[in-house]
Amino acid sequence: MTSLIIEDSLIDATLITDALTAQGFDDLQVFERAEDALAYIRSDAARPDFCLVDSRLPGMSGTDFIKLVKACQKMAGVPCISLSTSNLKDEIRIALAAGADGYFVKPSDVDEYERVIARIIEAHLTAN
């Protein structure tokens, strides 16, 4: 399974990739900027199985990225999960209105990251 991760924090990117690796995922495409991930999607024949997107990114926001992905024919049916440090209802509403298939508040420790990633994967596998 190919996982697309867009995260500008090196610490959070490492926690996410470590959690995915612990779940058995080894094809991880990690980008710091949404623009670079979008170029990857548009140019590469591979299609990720799911996307984990930081909602607050430099340049294009994670929410704008999700809107573009959801409008892309090639990415039809690919779940996009918004990750954020915020649990504000307005931010959650905005992410879901943009087409996010889920919204998770970033955990503060490694064990919780693994639990959150496991829930995301379980929800994705159950949906497919």
Image: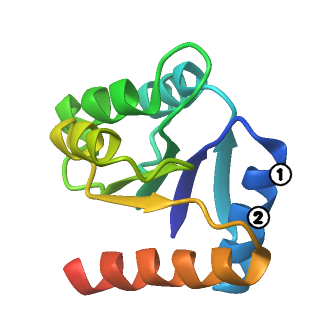
Could you classify mark 2 by the number of other residues whose Cα lies within 10 Å: few (under 14), some (14-19), or many (20 or more)?
A: many
Residue type at mark 1?
Ile
Where's residue 34, x and y in %? 53, 27
Where's residue 45, x and y in %? 45, 40
The image quarter containing residue 27 is bottom right
**Image color mode:** rainbow
Q: Name the foreground residue: 113 vs 19.
A: 113
Please say if the residues under marks 2 and 1 sit with CB atoms less than 8 Å apart: yes
Could you tell me which residue is drawn at 56 percent across and 13 percent down?
Answer: 59
Could you tell me which residue is drawn at 22 percent across and 35 percent down?
Answer: 98
Could you classify mark 1 by the number of other residues whose Cα lies within 10 Å: few (under 14), some (14-19), or many (20 or more)?
A: few
Where's residue 105, x and y in %? 50, 60
Q: Is residue 128 visible?
A: no
Can you identify the residue that label 1 sits on? 11
Picture layout, residue 52 above or below residue 23? above
- Quadrant of the snapshot with the C terminus: bottom left
The residue at the far front in this view is 88
Residue type at mark 2?
Leu
Could you tell me which residue is drawn at 23 percent across and 31 percent down?
Answer: 72
